[in-house]
Image (cartoon, rainbow, N blue to C red):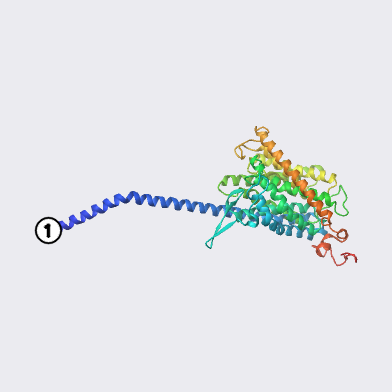
Amino acid sequence: MAKVTTKRKNYLARFLAIAIGAAIFAGFTPMIAHAIETGTLESLTKSTNELKLSVDTSWVLITGFLVFFMQCGFAMLEAGLVRQTGVVNTLAENFVDAAITLLAWWATGFAIAYGTTNNGFFGTDGFFLNNAFTLNNGAIEYALGSGGSTASVSTFTLFFFQFAFSATASTITTGSMAERTDFKGDLIYAFIMGAVMYPIVVHWVWNNGGWLNKLSFHDFAGSAVVHSVGGWTALVGAYILGPRPDRVWGQIPPAHNLGYATIGTMILWFGWYGFNAGSTLTLSNPGLAGLIVVNTTLAASTGAMTAFLYIYFRFRQWHLFCGLNGSLAGLVAITAGCAYVMPWAAALIGAVAGILVLVAVDIIEWFEIDDPVGAFAVHGTCGMMGVICVGLFGHPALTMNKKAGLFLGGGFDLLGVQLGGEVAIIIFVVIFSFLMFGALNAVGLLRVNPEADRIGIDVYEHGASAWPDVYPIDDLQFDDDED
């Protein structure tokens, strides 16, 4: 009997222990579950944000690398289109423009463009990237965006991406002023463009507080900000410089190497995917990125084809140079509206640009302005066209203010803003360019020394020739009284 009683007591004790444990567990289960749930949600949110930042940063950096690689495209294109006596000079200017623009963008350009606004015209903070990070007790914290941008990437990442755009604007100008610009003058005007002129226009359009931005001026990736600025600056510079030596009007000097020009154009086309699609600054809307890529490709393709066909019906020949510039014209024209129009409109925009660029080349030649690579025709003319086309073909499901273009039933509201904004940018750029180039010309730093016209700018400025077997420099001598 004693053994049976002991067993029963043990069973009872175990039962009571289990019951008490179950009661305690039941009482604390909601609290435990809530703690687990709260911790999971917080960590999941943190992980998601970190992942988004990583993806967006990777996207912006990779597309920024593509935009920077366009410097190689411009160098090859321009080197192929100029005469063989100016190839080294053209390559040197394209190369050094990237370097000098970076210094200008770091010192003042980025701050003026994306700093906290001052009445919508220019930024006032962020010089030398002094607000890109902070140090707290030895730990570094990276800032996101900037005073005038809510981009979800670090300030450093945004700085690099936008620097690549700035370098493009000054590089456009070198093509129109090729073969006769003083190298020191090129360094000076490239720095001024990257430090002051270009950043001011960027602030107006892409800074959250910019006056054109507040009016909903649409220029997604820079038909006005980059290409109109570069194109109109190039036109003013070419006009003040005067023509190259031995220039015969009505007979454009042939490109010395169409192989270079073709490679350069293909690099530019490739880099343009970074230029346009990268301007989303995020991959949170992958559908939009895909639309931009398709629109970009369609415009380049139709631009090339209409240029080829237009020149064929005029001269019964398939001119490669015209096809190359036609594709670039389509790319420039679609840059403003690549995120705001449907694919059919992108194809139409590119087709019109492919013809417009060739007509513009004829007009510039008629005015006797020497533009060796057709920079104004491609970037200035088609940049203006691209901005206007947003006001004509903008789709209300895609535009920033949900307004449609004129041809889609939206009236003149969007078109009026586009026209007014483009005119304001052109007036500012033309006045600034005349002052900048006029000052350089007055002190003798714009046009290269006349001796360079005699022996070639490559020999005079660089003591080199890209083709020493065809264009040797040993037989070319400087005047004895030359400095």
Q: Nearer the viewer, residue 245 or 197?
A: 197
Residue drawn at x 55%, y 53% as measured from the top left:
55
Q: Amino acid at mark 1?
A: Val
Q: Nearer the viewer, residue 467 or 474?
A: 474
Asked which secondary structure carries label 1, the reply is: helix
- Estimate the x, y position of residue 451 in percent, counting from the top left: 88, 60
In this rendering, position of residue 480 left or right of residue 36:
right
Q: Nearer the viewer, residue 242 or 24?
A: 24
- Estimate the x, y position of residue 264 in percent, counting from the top left: 72, 55
In this rendering, position of residue 235 left or right of residue 153:
right
Q: Is residue 163 visible?
A: yes
Q: Residue furthest right?
A: 480
In the rendered image, the quadrant that contains the N terminus is bottom left
- Estimate the x, y position of residue 321 in percent, counting from the top left: 77, 50
Q: Nearer the viewer, residue 201 or 90?
A: 201
Q: Which residue is mark 1?
A: 4
- Estimate the x, y position of residue 370 in percent, counting from the top left: 83, 50
